[in-house]
Amino acid sequence: MNWLNKYKEKHPARRCIFCGGNKVSREHLWSDWMAELFPEYADPNRVETYIVRNDKLFKNIKSETLDRPGLTFTKSIRAVCAPCNNGWMNTIEQAARPVLTPMFNSESLTLTEAMRDALATWCAMKFMVAEHMRRDHHTTPEDVRRQFMNTKVAPDFFRIWALRCGDGGWESGFSRNTAVVSLANKLPDGLSVRNTQSITWGVGDVLFYHTATLIPNLHFGISPAVDGLSVQLWPRIPDDIAWPVGRRLHWREGMALAESIKDSMRAPWE
Ligand SMILES: [Zn+2]
């Protein structure tokens, strides 16, 4: 086997995480129209957060932290093909844009169920892409991604909230925790899928928080410390909700929220 075949075996061609197509291109986590809204963040000296942490077992936490300083809106991810990106994904983007824009501009508005659905679908799409910032560290299974592409409805095991962040680093911060969780004391042999994650993503004034676990009947909620400052986008809740809710988060509260899933993960079996 020559070096090229060896390389190809070690690094199989990327396939689109949604349709399986092989014309995968680089995409930014931040959409172009969003970057235009926040020109003041274009300072290359600004320190932002990008963290992926992987815990194998919560009783015995082994953390691997990857800090990559840099603006999250300049980060690009190879995960999606151009036909998906320019087609159904762009439709989701355009549906969410009229809701996101006033939120990014600190305007008050009433979030109807349909508006929250548009936000939740957009967030779910972004999170599924963001899971692929690192290869083989994703949580959402392929069949769920395929179903999402077909239905444009966020998976029912997703939890998504929106909050407001204050100054100090979350305006384009991104943090993801992934883990292999088992309700048993020991991880079953062969269980290596990162079945649980939380994502905290700051976009200008708005901080999105997300949890998901593939373990049936288990959910990770939002930290009680900031529950009253959040709007639940997904799963659906009835009634119109006035945005914004309460005060802005201090950046330290954002950091605490980003790490909070680790505390709740220990709770059920200790
Ligand atoms: Zn595709």
Image (spheres, grey):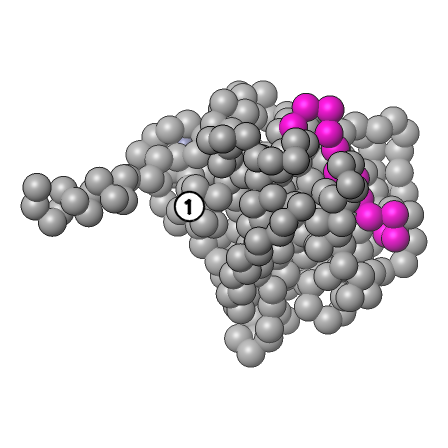
Residue 135 in sight: yes
Which residue is situated farthest in the front direction here? 185
Q: Position of residue 161 (x, y in %)?
A: 76, 42
Which quadrant is the N terminus positioned in? top left
Q: Position of residue 228 (x, y in %)?
A: 91, 47
Quarter of the render that holds ligand 1? top left
Main SS class of the magenta portion in the image: loop
Which residue is found at the position 60% from the left and 64% from the top?
49
**Position of 103 compared to 52: left or right?**
right
Which residue is found at the position 56% from the left and 71% from the top?
42
Which residue is found at the position 33% from the left and 39% from the top?
14
What residue span does the magenta drawing correspond to? 215-226
Residue 90 in sight: no
| Residue designated by label 1 | 135
Which residue is situated farthest in the left direction here? 2
In the image, residue 12 above or below residue 61? above
**Position of 218 compared to 186: left or right?**
right
**Position of 43 compared to 79: left or right?**
right
Which residue is found at the position 43% from the left and 34% from the top?
17
Q: Position of residue 8 (x, y in %)?
A: 20, 42
> What amino acid type should be assigned to the residue bearing mark 1?
Arg
The image quadrant of residue 110 is top right
